[in-house]
Image (cartoon, grey):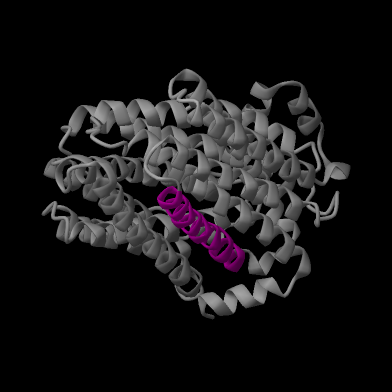
Amino acid sequence: MSFFGDLRGVLRGPRFRRLFGVRVVSQFADGTFQAGLAGYVFFSPEQHTTAAEVAVAFAVLLLPFSVVGPFAGVLIDRWPRRRVLVAASLAKAVLAALTAALVAAGADGAPFLAAALLVLSVNRFLLAALSAALPHVVPRERLMMANAVTPTCGTFAAFLGAGAGAGLRLAGGDGTAGTALVLLGAGAAFAAAGCAALTLGRRELGPDLAAAPPEVRAAVRGVVSGLVDGARHIRARRPARAGLATIAGLRFVFGVSTLLTLLLYNNTFTGGGTAGLAGFSVALAASGAGFFAGAVATPWATARVPTGTWIAVLMAGGAAVLLAFGLPLSPVLFPVAAFGVGAVSQGVKVAVDTLVQRHVDDTYRGRVFSVYDMLFNAAFVAAAGSAAVAVPPSGVSRATVAAMAGCYAAMAVLWAVRHRGLDAAAPAGVDTAAGR
């Protein structure tokens, strides 16, 4: 079935449509907000950002997500998930307005970073709740379709939001007034997402507490024990374990590629400022097109070949694209490499999301996806830190591009040889090889 056929299929369910609407509106707002931050932090006029400065910015904005994640997982396994969606969306709306006020007042130091950090941290609750709620609104046999169309449409909504942010920036100008207008627009969209979440039933998204084992109730009293429970649950299920390890490696490569691309367009391909932001946006758009391609291809491919085989094919293709189009470090060819990285990232993520959802119990999904988020963001920050050491301020580092291709190739071999049959394992069953 085609991507649009899959989308029409899952949209027939009214409960799915409402949850889908929350995701699309919320991620549109995320794109607008992040566009405002990126233009203000990385592409200010006359600024030439170093790798270390980019790494510090990523660490400030992303590493705390790994602290928030365990709290999010424990609470969304206990609170009605609709309540999480509404509260998180409205909190983000208020914080976005506060961030806009700080920008307008010229406060670009610690208060600004703290407000932006709070917006992005609250987002952990919302995204984890969306992932944990999805199996409640679609039949099990449609999870692969739903995992292909919902995050992908959310990603495209984020790209549209970034475009809307760019339009608002043009209307408001390059100064602080333009950035404040973008952030206020994001706040309005966050509020709209909260209103959309109110159309869902209070209990229809879970969690299923009636069947909850004692471990869940104990996790509410102890965030650390809740995270340990989630990690043990993953460890006992080999498909989920292998999937999360793959996501960590994939996100590491994506983090390196993001930092490298930002430096190239800000310091080498252009003179920085508006030109750098425009060039980076082209690469980002190419990556978005790759996300779409990976999402469209994955449900079709996994209906015909084992999931592990498809992941191996994607990784091998990504290595080839990086060597052919990334290694020359050409502003003409680099967007093609960005397309390849986007296709691999989204295609593998769709497959891994489905593996994780199929092979973990509902009462643990929140904590499992919190571990997922923790790995997702920590790997990105680790990549930025590693690249800060290896990549010069110009971004010109062919050795780094070759190393990224080597990581893809290594993961391709691992899935082709060791993990190709994991999807055939009994769902949510304990893996007898867990201790190996």
The kind of secondary structure the magenta stretch mainly shows is helix
Rendering coords of residue 118 (x, y %): 58, 29
In magenta stretch: residue 420: no
Q: Is residue 413 left or right of residue 237?
A: left
Rendering coords of residue 175 (x, y %): 39, 37
Q: In this view, does 141 lie to the left or right of 14?
A: left
Rendering coords of residue 305 (x, y %): 44, 72
Decide which of 83, 10 is in the foreground and name it.
83
Q: Is residue 350 left or right of residue 326?
A: right
The picture quadrant where one finds residue 392 is: top left
Rendering coords of residue 411 (x, y %): 33, 50
Decide which of 74, 141 is in the foreground and name it.
74
Q: Is residue 231 visible to us here?
A: no
Kindly give the residue lying farthest to the right in the view shown. Answer: 210
The picture quadrant where one finds residue 150 is: bottom right
Numbered marks: total: 0
- Above or below — where is 42 with respect to 138? above
- Above or below — where is 420 with respect to 375? below
In which quadrant will I find the N terminus?
A: bottom right
Taking the spot 71% from the left edge, 32% from the top edge, the residue there is 74
Q: In this view, does 337 lie to the left or right of 17?
A: left
The picture quadrant where one finds residue 109 is: top left
Q: What stretch is highlighted in magenta?
A: 144-171
